[in-house]
Amino acid sequence: MSYEILRRIFSLAYFIIPVSLIPFGFYEWHMVLISLLFYYIVVFIGVECGLHRYFTHNSYKTTRFWEYFLSIFPIFLTIGSPIAWTAIHRAHHRKSDTELDPHSPKYIPLWRIFTVTWSADHLSLKVGFARGVDFKFQKFLHDHYYKLVSLYILLLGLIGLEYIVYFWALPSLVAHVYQQVVNTLGHSADYNEDTKDHSRDIKFLGFIFPIIGYHHQHHLVPQAHRIGKGLKHLEPDFPAFLIEKIFMKKQ
Ligand SMILES: [Zn+2]
Ligand SMILES: [Zn+2]
């Protein structure tokens, strides 16, 4: 089965499972909070430090250990292999808010953005990772991505079926919605002459979600590992802090 068909099947599962359990009184609130915390950690480290700022924008150098770690960590949210994720995000930056932007709210209806029924089939997956990235490993991850997701779900199921909901389906659904909020709110401005797109900063949200808070700043300098200017300027950027303290290879 192709990657794209599997993506749709797994997305449907993490859409349906968490919602269908609500009427049965399944949820324990302390577990929901732990689940949201888990989502937040994986989204900041795996998606923002890894898939976004390292693999897509090559905004810093890291060690092989952290490169593998940042490749595998976001699997917990079924957010797409590094090859697929970077292909979509590179196309978004190259063609922002044009007909060739895979998820521009100017051209694609909101319901299609949120259900991810826009197609990424036409994108070339031969993405330009930085020289030095272990492409063979990335190809392996991409070819076996949904087997690895299945293995993760199986391991959770062996601990207890409820863990599949709290540590896979629910955080994956929240991460999915979060990404589509970035794609829509982050591109809700009038036309910007400097970036030739509709990207927008919503500064107060930067405290919790830097990529929403400083989205226009990010489009201005996509290759910068730091998007917010820092706490002194009331623009905290926690992923940039983690990159500088942990992931960035010191020269
Ligand atoms: Zn954008
Ligand atoms: Zn970007």
Image: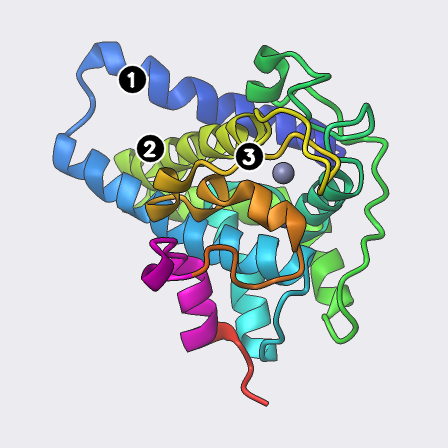
Q: CA distance from mark 1 to mark 2?
A: 9 Å
Amino acid type at circle 2 is Val
Residue 59, magenta (yes or no): no
Residue at image point 14% right, 31% down: 29
108 to the left or right of 123? left
In the rendered image, residue 243 lying in the magenta stretch gets the answer yes
Residue 169, percent from left and from top: 40, 32
Query: Which disc number belongs to residue 165?
Result: 2
Mark 2 or mark 3, which is nearer the start of the sequence?
A: 2
User: Which residue is the site of mark 1?
Assistant: 21
Q: Secondary structure at mark 2?
A: helix
> Mark 3 against mark 2, which lies toward the viewer?
3
Say the numbered circle drawn on residue 204. none
- On the rendered image, what quadrant is the N terminus found in? top right
Task: Look at mark 3 in the image and give the residue it sits on.
Answer: 200
Quadrant of the drawing holding the C terminus: bottom right
Comes first in the chain, label 1 or label 2: 1
What amino acid is labelled 3 in the image?
A: Arg
